[in-house]
Amino acid sequence: MRALTEEETQTLFSKLANYTGRSLNHLIQPPSDSSHDGERNVFRLHASRVYYMKLSIANLATSIARQDLLSLGTCLGKFTKTGKFRLHITALDIIAPHARYKVWIKPNGEMPFLYGSNIVKAHIGRWSEDCPEHQGVVVFSMDDKPLVCDVTRALVYGPVVSANLSSRGSALQRGPPLKLEGWSPQESRCSDRLM
């Protein structure tokens, strides 16, 4: 387990800033009024995965051999072989309280959304104001439970608003909602579609 290099830190922070904005500072140094006793949080790399933990725990982990250490702290994601950073679902609990843009889904729209459908306008309970296109957003249920964090795409097709939360590497990839004669759901799962 080691500290991130400058390039890795920049890649990680740019990905996290897409979701958190200026509150990214609160991930590193929690506010003094919180219950964290003022201790700093750090990011550590182990086997191409980035972990988020308190500094005191990271210091204790230096006494464990690298091959014996499986994980420590909360896994935020991993670096790919090309140097890109991909968030894991375990990062949702860390990112959700600090998210800049949020979308709340009504209870009748949660299951269709989690099974891969687009977000229908009727299923949106509320959303953050001025959410731009291609911006990181956290999707919540109406009782403020985070469901997924992803990137928006502002496409409107009739009554359907496609938030297109395309979680690369997960089963939640969605395409634009097409309403065509002779259209089948299997055709909509193709990787490339005309937009």
Image: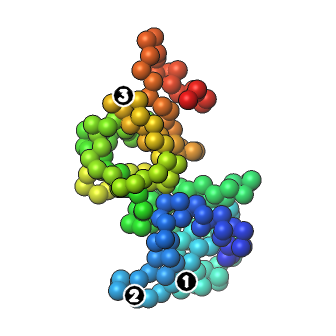
Report helix, strand or loop for mark 1: helix
Quarter-of-image position of residue 60:
bottom right
Quadrant position of the N terminus in the picture: bottom right
Q: Quadrant of residue 37?
A: bottom left
Which circle's residue, 2 or 3, is located before the other in the chain? Answer: 2
Residue 189, above or below 184: below
Q: Mark 1: few, some, or many residues within 10 Å (few <14, many ≥20)?
A: some
For marks 2 and 3, give the CA distance: 48 Å
Q: Residue at x 60, y 63 (%)?
A: 14
Residue 55 circle label: 1
Q: CA distance from mark 1 to mark 2?
A: 16 Å
Q: Residues within 10 Å of mark 3 (few under 14, many from 20)?
A: few
In the image, what residue type sits under mark 2?
Ser
Point out the image quarter for the C terminus: top right
- The residue beneath circle 2 is 32
Label 3 belongs to which residue? 158
* Contact flag, marks 2 and 3 (Cβ < 8 Å): no
Q: Amino acid at mark 1?
A: Leu
Q: Nearer the viewer, residue 80 or 132?
A: 132
In the drawing, does residue 20 fall left or right of residue 77?
left
